[in-house]
Image: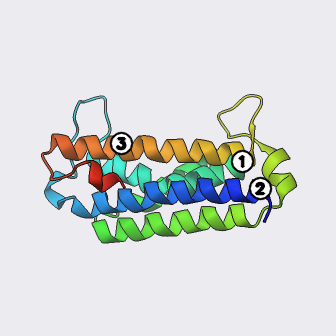
């Protein structure tokens, strides 16, 4: 296996850490807390969770496949009715696997040289491997947000839930 594919796999493995540990957090959520919103200008717990589980698929469509804003929004709209934690965890797993399959289907040249840009960029864009890094940091960012919400709600969560 090439060094580039090794790097890709390390990034995907780390992304899976975010997915796996986020799923552990999601499973702990009680239905009564879905509407929790720390401040008026912030997302609710259910909105953060829906966004988090959508990231692998939404970012695949938006960043890597250059889909429209409407197609991007449709992904979160499809998740929006789901409130069962086990089902949200399954959707997250499925979305991760779809993203992983996409990256495993790419050759080295596309990983390093294929530039795509999302609908909200006027110019520029990034190569596919850089987008994978962006998706990784995006996922960890919202996992941290979810963790903080649960701490504020006094759930029994700690750093060991993140590994």
Q: Which residue is mark 1?
A: 129
CB within 8 Å, label 2 to label 3: no
Whether residue 114 is visible, yes or no, is no
Q: 10 Å neighbourhood of mark 1: few (<14), some, or many (≥20)?
A: many
- Quadrant of the rendered structure where residue 116 is? top right
Asked if 153 appears above or below 21 in the picture, the reply is above
Looking at the rendered structure, the secondary structure element under dot 2 is helix
Question: Horizontal and vertical percent for residue 90?
Answer: 41, 71
In-front residue for pair 61/153:
153
Looking at the rendered image, the disc whose residue lies closer to the viewer, 2 or 3, is 2
Looking at the rendered image, the disc whose residue lies closer to the viewer, 1 or 2, is 2
Mark 1 or mark 3: whose residue is earlier in sequence: 1
Measuring 51% from the left and 69% from the top, which residue is drawn there? 94
Q: Quadrant of the C terminus?
A: bottom left
Instruction: Tell me how far mark 1 sits from mark 2, CA to CA.
Output: 13 Å
Question: Horizontal and vertical percent for residue 71?
Answer: 61, 53
In-front residue for pair 151/54:
151
Asked if 3 appears above or below 89 in the picture, the reply is above
Q: 10 Å neighbourhood of mark 3: few (<14), some, or many (≥20)?
A: some
Q: Which residue is mark 3?
A: 144
Q: Which residue is mark 2?
A: 3
Numbered label tally: 3
CB within 8 Å, label 1 to label 2: no
Asked if 89 appears above or below 54 in the picture, the reply is below
Instruction: Tell me how far mark 1 sits from mark 3, CA to CA.
Output: 23 Å
Mark 2 or mark 3: whose residue is earlier in sequence: 2
Horizontal side of 3 relative to 144 (left or right) equals right
């Amino acid at each position: 296996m090439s060094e580039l594919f090794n790097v890709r796999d390390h990034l995907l493995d780390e992304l899976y850490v975010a997915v796996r540990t986020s799923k552990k957090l999601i499973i702990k959520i009680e239905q009564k807390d879905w509407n929790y919103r720390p401040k008026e200008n912030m997302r609710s717990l259910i909105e953060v969770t829906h966004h988090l589980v959508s990231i692998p698929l939404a970012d695949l469509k938006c960043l890597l496949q250059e889909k429209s804003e409407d197609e991007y929004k449709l992904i979160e709209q499809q998740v929006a009715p789901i409130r069962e934690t086990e089902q949200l965890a399954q959707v997250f797993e499925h979305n991760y696997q779809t993203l992983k399959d996409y990256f495993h289907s790419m050759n080295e040249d596309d990983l390093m040289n294929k530039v795509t840009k999302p609908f909200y960029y006027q110019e520029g864009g990034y190569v596919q491997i850089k987008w994978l890094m962006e998706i990784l940091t995006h996922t960890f960012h919202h996992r941290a947000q979810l963790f903080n919400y649960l701490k504020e709600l006094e759930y029994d969560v700690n750093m060991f839930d993140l590994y």
